[in-house]
Image: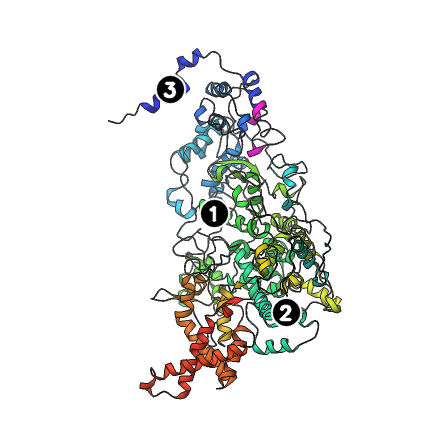
Amino acid sequence: MRCTWLPVCLLALHFGTPAARAAEGPAPTFPKDVSPILEAKCVRCHGAKVKKADLDLSTPAGVIKGGESGPAVVPGRPDKSPLYERVHKAEMPPAKKDQLAAAEVETLRRWIAAGARFPDGSAEVAVTQHDVIPIMLRHCTACHGRHRKEATLDLRTPAAMLRGGRSGPAIVPGRPAESLVVARITAGQMPPAKKLVEACVKPVEKAELDTLTKWIAAGALVTDVRPDVATTTPDPLVTDKDRDFWAFRPPQPVSVPAVKAAGRVRTPIDAFVLAKLEAAGLTFAPDADRAALMRRASIDLTGLPPEPAEVRAFLEDRQPDAYEKLIDRLLASPRYGERWGRYWLDLAGYADSEGKREQDLPRPHAWRYRDYVIKSFNADKPYDRFLMEQLAGDELADYASAKEITPEIYDNLVATGFLRMAPDATWANITGFIPDRIEVLADEIDVLGSAVLGLTVKCARCHTHKFDPIPHRDYYRLVAVFKGALDEYDWLKPDIRPGLGPESIDVAPPRLLPFVPAADRKAWEAKRAANGKLPEPKIQAVWDRGEPSPTYIYRRGDYLMPGALVGPGVPSVLTDGKTPFEVKPPWPGAKSTGRRLAFAKWVTQPSHPLTARVMANRIWKHHFGTGIVSTPANFGRTGAPPTHPELLDWLAREFVAPTPTLSGGRQPPVPDNSLLPDKTREDQKTQGANAPRSGWSLKSLHRLIMTSTVYRQSSAIVPEAKKLDPANVLYSRAPLARLDAEALYDSLLLVAGKLDETRGGPADAVQARKDGLVTPGGTARGWRRLVYVQQTRKQPATHAETFDFPQMNPNCTERRDSTVAPQALYLMNNGMVDQLAAEFAKRVRREAGDDRTKQIEAVYLIAMSRFPTDEEKQLGRDALRDLAAAWDKPLASGKPTRDAVELKALTNYCHAVLNSASFLYVD
């Protein structure tokens, strides 16, 4: 038989029986007994000036209110009171020397057990409208809210509840039994059972009904509690010491250091790096040879090796600025946007499917955002404008009132697809409940934090960040910024199952007209007239719908535990305690809130501590394999400190500065400006094509980095550098890097002559084969670049998955770089690679004829962007001879021609080259 009385006995021993409590004497009082303990042991971290976890224990009001996890004390229940629990377990105060004595802990226990009374007699927080409104939002406003007011009833505010609907007031203050809303819920009539699935709501819980009843019984108290927003008063949750961390201060002006080996300095970047090298007793490696440097630059900027004619032309160009002109040509290539746009798509979490559910529903219009990103990179759209369009493109112009949708307006709207890229489980089945919606919001905040701010903002979703000064409420201030477009209580339902109204009769034949209701005939005729027209293009975007629901802090991240009301704001640690932005309508009479536009303007300030630093660090990382901050998505306290902090600040400030004139008086190459705003393009026409442009130029940053000695170094390791800089954190040599998934796939196609360079448009579908491989569908001319291949979360292309292409969950801020056996097996045995090797051999035959030496030269030029050495030529001739001899016997039964034997041998040779380190790695 189970002993069920033991826990009860233990509780009785611990908390005492009534008789035992009486023997303890009079209960402690707050002013005399409790307040001195809190003042001595707790208020230093939980007071009016510093409120860790948003908890103030210096006043009765603060104790009653509690902190971000809820009430600090539960009257009569020490075992349920976080304050007592933490001190009883010696978890708080954290320092052992500050912990409470046993007698002090017992005093707190007795005070709470006696009802936690205060001098004015209060012992619990009054129920207000802010305890009730979240209940209405969760269960009622889908039918009685902004968009639908069934029975003319709106339940979003106390005033609307008092006003009521067709049946009268919803609440009668002081008389819950006479309040219709209580009666309907108690009777199980609201929410209606038959509409639970359609509205995606759940029945009201008993505890929620009790809260509503208690509020009405107490007179439906309405308190003037304003949303907690950042003001000019310093936030007590964030200190000046917190703000003094290097990443939270604006980039500082720095002087370029003097160095001994000044002759190796080509740009200021070199001076910063060389100063560290010289301090360690090192210097730069020699420059890489011209062929290696050309291949490195070409793959870095375009993701493709140079063509043989380009290699020859560059090697023959002996002008002093030949390399600089090469960089300009590569930056002006449309291939640049396909390469570097892909990096941004990783950060945005781009995918052609929704993810989250087994169905992995497709996103048929996501490709427009992909094309927007690629074209923006090719246009060298200023990064601040690029961010602004993605964060608030719908608030940059009054698109709804525009006479026509201009390319600029179209781009602005498509750009907001950035906020639609996170995995989305809402409506993956037949419902989209609030938790699924909140997950989408959380993922978007995660994407924003990791991609743009370089902070682990997501860690403040359930509680104040454990390491960085990001309070719990700052997370929900960010949520409020995006609430006008992404509102868990006002979620747009996709048109999955249209009803039988006018919107569904566009295929009805004329003979059905007599059966169409008279009220619908006009709509029917309009639909019928539109049948012959091309369908309007659809985009995946967000737009501000105005009137967002109130934003409450979700204690412990639980939407069923709403806390304080907050307004839109930004991380307090980045504001110097001042109002960071001003929210106002984006244009006179706008229905949009302007919140995201205010945020976009704030985040793109040139003096912002993180925006320019984070992006400059990413650009550096993709050129050198590791960032100056090696944790590109975490510039916080748990992230890696910068190896070259002065260089990072210098790069950030150069990034936002106006574009300089190049050496020799040259100007940057004129980019594809088709995606720049109309006014900007007009200004450039007025000023001249080569007029200096505004700052935030990514291409200028590339040019600055790639013309440096740091970038031009050889990857060869000398013993001294291996000893003193084994991990190359001082940049004593160029990194040796394997081609990533896209560069390898695209390069295979290019060398084989099967790269279809058709750009943009819907993604090329992948095919799941019976053998388990997932392969891209080809075109009449071959295959398109991997960036244009359908990217689903559940079924990625086999090549991409094998070579570390990421699953977007929700995004990817840094790809892993593995070297595993399946990669070698794929290149050796995959049928598509075999086919491309054969096409490569045919190309070599077309370009070099039957001469084996010329064939070997062509193979090296095409695949490795260099000429073979004499030794390599001899090895190649020997290999082709032996392979041809080996193929004579297998092909003997078919009486092969000499031509067929030679082609087989050359195909094997080309296949071996495609498996070589010289092809797979960038030197």
Q: Is residue 916 above or below residue 850?
A: above
Assess whether residue 48 is covered by the magenta stretch: yes
Q: Quadrant of the N terminus?
A: top left
Residue type pointed to by label 1: Glu
Q: Quadrant of the C terminus?
A: bottom right
In the rendering, at what x and y percent does residue 348 appear?
Answer: 54, 56
Residue under pointer 3: 12
Q: Residue furthest left?
A: 1
Q: Which residues are magenta?
A: 40-62
Assess whether residue 718 is covered by the magenta stretch: no
Residue under pointer 2: 332
Q: Main secondary structure of the magenta part?
A: loop
The structure's colour scheme is rainbow
How far separated are the C-alphas under marks 1 and 2?
40 Å
Residue under pointer 1: 439
* Sooner in the amino-acid sequence: mark 2 or mark 3: 3
Quarter of image, res 472? top right
Answer yes or no: do the residues labelled 1 and 2 have beta carbons within 8 Å?
Answer: no
Label 2 neighbour load within 10 Å: few <14, some 14-19, many 20+:
many
Answer yes or no: do the residues labelled 2 and 3 have beta carbons within 8 Å?
Answer: no
